[in-house]
């Protein structure tokens, strides 16, 4: 039996309400700064690419470290920009979903014209960061922007919006690699493909929080398409993630210790599938968030 939802996107009395001025708080919520898991999931594939391109931890110098920090700042800004775009498209749909009806645009605490101005500022900051990098990285970053803009529409058009998110969200793997090596290679492409299947898996898990509301609102998702077979599908996606990560690491010349830690990351995915209760929204959210640990384990494997 599906449990009654008692969680929403916005939980008051957190650090945003305690620290930030009242006029700034709606924009912090609009960027989802109170829920940094999205920042991590956007950032980590780029760190995979950067560290592997550098040859592991021993190759980290000032240049590489500066790019790790630049990508960190870029992930905060561009994840925020993506959230603003998403909420501009979805402000009417969000009103019909329990978890999202408190979002600033849906609730009216931020007006669309204000969100557009804020989005322009975020995109300008993102462009400034991007222009610090190699030409290949700049071109990849520009290529990703139209994908970010149209992603929110996918849930209206296809049962596979999670696949489009995977295509969009993992450009960081290519950009991180090219920022260090000024080109692309098979290892980078393998990391990108691994990230695609990882996103397809974890975002299917995430979508199970909203499946009842989504059906009523006419929103499509892989959670609804797969139904009770979702765990089998997600397990398959995670399996492909590991196969492609192993291929990418081997192409990058990773050693035995690195591969062993990568297998530990794979064990985390198995644990996640064993623990996931797809009809329990709170458990589903916890399993989704646990993917940060997986991504960090992959970073550790790259460092070794």
Image (spheres, rainbow, N blue to C red):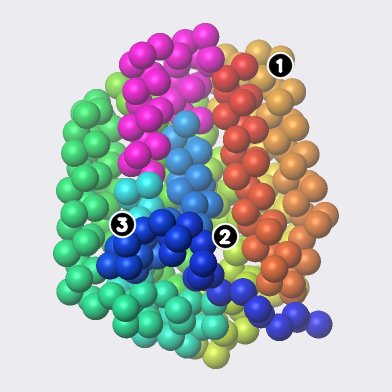
**Mark 3 = which residue?**
81
Q: Secondary structure at mark 1?
A: helix
Task: Give the mark nearer the N terminus: 1 vs 2.
Answer: 2
The alpha-carbon separation of the residues under discs 1 and 3 comes to 38 Å
The x, y position of residue 137, in whole percent, is: 28, 32
Residue at (60, 45) in percent of width and height: 292
**Mark 2 = which residue?**
203
- Mark seen at residue 257: 1
Determine whether 72 is above or below 179 in the image.
below
Marks 2, 3: nearer the viewer: 3
- Mark 1 in CB contact with mark 3 (< 8 angstroms): no
Residue at (35, 26) in percent of width and height: 67
Q: Is residue 230 visible?
A: no
Mark 2 crowd level (few <14, some 14–19, many ≥20, 10 Å Cα): many
Q: Secondary structure at mark 3?
A: helix
Examine the structure image and report whether residue 175 is included in the region drawn in magenta.
no
> Which quadrant of the rendered structure holds the C terminus?
top right
Marks 1, 3: nearer the viewer: 3
Residue nearest the viewer, comparing 71 with 178? 71
Mark 3 crowd level (few <14, some 14–19, many ≥20, 10 Å Cα): many
Residue nearest the viewer, comparing 246 with 72? 72
- Give the residues drawn in magenta, as a range: 48-75
Residue reaching furthest top? 58
Examine the structure image and report whether residue 49 is included in the region drawn in magenta.
yes
**Based on the displayed image, in which of its 4 quarters is residue 84 positioned?**
bottom left
Q: Main secondary structure of the magenta part?
A: helix
Using residue 116 as the reference point, say whether residue 290 is left or right of it.
Answer: right
The x, y position of residue 93, in whole percent, is: 41, 83
- Mark seen at residue 302: none
Residue at (47, 87) in percent of width and height: 96
């Amino acid at each position: 039996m599906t449990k009654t939802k008692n969680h929403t996107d916005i939980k008051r009395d957190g650090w945003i309400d305690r620290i930030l001025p009242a006029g700034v708080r709606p924009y912090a919520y609009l960027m989802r700064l109170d829920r940094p898991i999205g920042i991590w999931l956007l950032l980590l594939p780029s760190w995979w690419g950067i560290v592997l391109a550098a040859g592991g931890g021993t190759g980290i110098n000032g240049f590489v470290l500066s790019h790790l920090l630049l990508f960190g700042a870029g992930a905060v800004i561009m994840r925020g920009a993506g959230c603003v775009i998403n909420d501009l498209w979805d402000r009417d749909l969000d009103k019909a979903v329990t978890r999202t009806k408190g979002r600033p645009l849906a609730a009216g605490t931020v007006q669309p014209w204000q969100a557009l101005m804020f989005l322009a500022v975020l995109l300008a900051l993102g462009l400034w960061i991007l222009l610090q990098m190699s030409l290949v990285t700049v071109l990849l970053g520009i290529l990703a922007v139209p994908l970010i803009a149209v992603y929110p529409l996918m849930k209206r058009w296809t049962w596979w919006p999670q696949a489009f998110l995977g295509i969009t969200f993992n450009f960081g793997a290519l950009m991180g690699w090219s920022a260090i090596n000024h080109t692309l290679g098979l290892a980078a492409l393998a990391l990108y493909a691994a990230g695609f299947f990882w996103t397809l898996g974890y975002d299917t898990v995430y979508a199970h929080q909203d499946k009842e509301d989504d059906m009523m609102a006419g929103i499509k998702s892989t959670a609804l398409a797969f139904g009770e077979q979702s765990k089998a599908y997600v397990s398959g996606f995670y399996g492909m993630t590991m196969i492609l990560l192993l291929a990418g690491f081997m192409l990058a010349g990773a050693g035995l210790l690195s591969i062993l830690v990568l297998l530990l990351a794979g064990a985390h995915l198995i644990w996640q599938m064993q623990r996931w209760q797809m009809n329990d929204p709170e458990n589903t959210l916890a399993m989704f968030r646990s993917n940060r640990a997986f991504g960090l384990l992959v970073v550790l494997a790259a460092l070794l």
